[in-house]
Amino acid sequence: MLTDYPELVAFLPCESPKEWVQWALENENLLLIDHAHCEKKAASTAMNLMYRYVDRENLLHKMSQLAREELLHFEQVLKIMRNRGVEYGHLEASRYASGLRQHIRTHEPAKLIDTLIIGAFVEARSCERFAVLIPHLDDEVAKFYKSLLKSEARHFEDYLSLAEEYAGEPIDERVQFFREIERQLITEPDVEFRVHSGPPKAA
């Protein structure tokens, strides 16, 4: 499935650890709950960018579309959860997003560029994780995750193209900087399972 998105695969620094995949399958309810949170956060991120950068026409257009799609995905996850009797509740966020965002530069346009690059990594990793889980999931969730791949890959492309557009200069060095941080966050062990956690910490 990921072979249909070679640019996305090349963008990510590594594959998800097999230990994380097994962890996800052992915590499918938690996977769905955190997935719902991720979709809601993704919509919120897009909306925040729209409020902060009102003079960026292409950003406004793409983030508006992205926010609508993420909220639709949020509703779709909730429907699956409701059908399975899984209750949606509060979860502490994983260290993934905060681990990336703590390196955002504070001056503009660097702040915008870093935020967009991080958005590209979040969407690309989400797409990759859905893809590696699909062969192991039941038909309902597998079909749903397969339906998400195209939009998640497009969101990755939108974030990256906006970063390139507004940087006005090559962003390769900055992408490589965040790629190394993303690799660490994905491969280093975590205590709690999340959609974007690392593998489980050994007992």
Image (cartoon, helix red, strand yellow):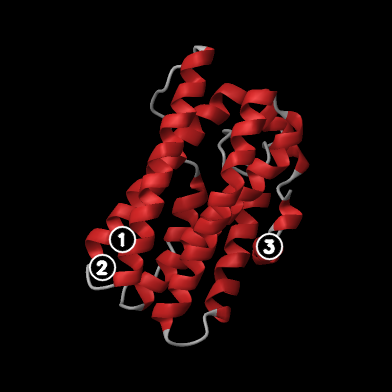
Task: Please tell me the numbered disc located at residue 172.
Answer: none
Residue at the location (42% across, 22% down)? 88
Within the image, what quadrant is residue 27 found in? top right
Is 56 located above or below residue 31 in the figure? below
Q: Is residue 27 visible?
A: no
Task: Please tell me the numbered disc located at residue 13.
Answer: 3
Instruction: Tell me which amino acid carries mark 1.
Output: Leu
Residue 51 at x, y percent in the picture: 22, 59
Q: Is residue 130 visible?
A: yes
Distance of label 2 from label 1 (alpha carbons): 6 Å
Residue at the location (60% across, 52% down)? 125
Query: Disc 3 vs disc 1: Cβ atoms closer than 8 Å?
Result: no
Residue at the disc numbered 2: 53
For disc 1, the neighbor class at 10 Å (few under 14, some 14 to 19, many from 20) is some
Instruction: Tell me which amino acid carries mark 3.
Output: Pro
| Nearest to N terminus: mark 2 or mark 3 | 3
Residue at the disc numbered 1: 49
Q: Secondary structure at mark 3?
A: loop
Which marked residue is nearer to the observer: mark 2 or mark 3? 2
Residue 138 at x, y percent in the picture: 70, 23
Is 103 located above or below residue 166 in the figure? above
Please state if 144 lies on the left or on the right of 77 as rendered: right
